[in-house]
Amino acid sequence: RTWKKRLMGLGGKPTPKRQATRRALKAREPKLVENTRKAFFIKGPKTSQIITTAMKDMYMMKKPNAKMMNRKNQKLRPFEDHSSIEFFSNQLDASLFCYGSKSKKKSHSLTLGRTFNYQLLDMVEVSINVDDEFKSIRDFSGERKKAVQYGSKPMFIFQGDQYELSEDYKTVKSLILDFFRGDVVEKINLASLCRVIVCTATNDRLYFRHYAVNLKRSGTKIPNVELEELGPRMNWTIRRVKSADDELRKKAMRKPKARKSQKTVKNIERGKLGDKMGRVHMEKQDTQTMALRKFKSLKKRKGKGGGDGEVDASKRQRTSADDE
């Protein structure tokens, strides 16, 4: 009983002893401003070369907030049983996933989904059309470094009326935004906006394109903007969509109440090095009447018999006598 009491904390959960474990658990706690969403890429029992290449390209676009799992999973089928997806989401602390598989009826299929509180929220299954031209990042001779440049944020363009009329395309749009938007920041450097993701919906197909933004001189303050395709170039067809439950969606969309801001303490500032500095307001003081430390060299000399004039006259007489 004694060792059980030591292990159990106030909430009935075992309290970790190592500092690293405490930091890891604290990082997983709910926050007002969420961390950057991580994604894991996982393969099914069978995959094709096109699926493997597409997953690698999307992994490069998502880095460093991504985890690639190279092993194939024989019993993993998200639409039939999503317990494995929830298990990996909890183990990797990732709320986004990309699942690739191949079968006789569905040759090249990708499944994009997300979880909330390690429970499956929603997911979409799309197929890559082989009849159309598929190109990866390696097939383009453009600036490949911009596709994986750390700190760069992509811009998004969604073309087509189906994003407003169809619920399936609304879910696809939301998933693409969550997958590739990166860190949520208040301010941004325009130099980091060097990529554009264009998703065009027409004729029951979704055309996924990825471009680099090149700024060239124009002789004026406003530069000329040119787009250069980076890849991957994919044409999708939506197959299956699993929307979120109403109760789970309400929990996921709920915004926590902001904490009360701490009272600002007046006349206290922080320096550039983090030093705490305070400002004290006092009345004007007269240093002549203050009890300060007095030095002998600053005291005025007084003569024994008379004033200062007599002392100066005696000094002059002594110096003149010495000179003679």
Image (spheres, rainbow, N blue to C red):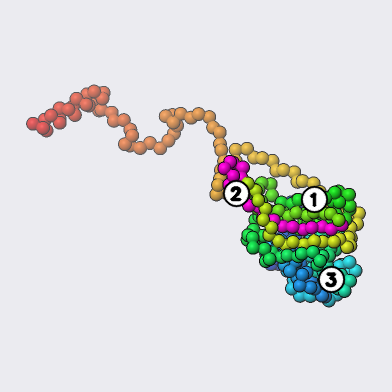
Secondary structure mainly formed by the magenta segment: strand
Figure quadrant of residue 15: bottom right
Q: Nearer the viewer, residue 38 or 113?
A: 113
- Is residue 208 inside the magenta stretch? yes
Crowding around mark 2 (Cα neighbors within 10 Å: few <14, some 14 to 19, many 20+) is: few
Q: Which residue is mark 1?
A: 159
Type of amino acid at the residue the image marks with label 1:
Gln
- Residue 143 visible? The answer is yes
Q: If you read the primary sequence from the N terminus, does the residue marked by circle 2 or circle 1 appear first?
A: 1
Which residue is located at x 77 percent, y 62 percent? Answer: 234
Q: How many marks?
A: 3
User: Residue 107: which numbered mark, if any?
Assistant: 3
Whether tag 3 and tag 1 are in contact, CB under 8 A, the answer is no
Question: From which residue to which does the magenta span run?
Answer: 204-223
In the rendered structure, the answer to whether residue 228 lies left or right of residue 199 reads left
Q: Which residue is mark 2?
A: 216
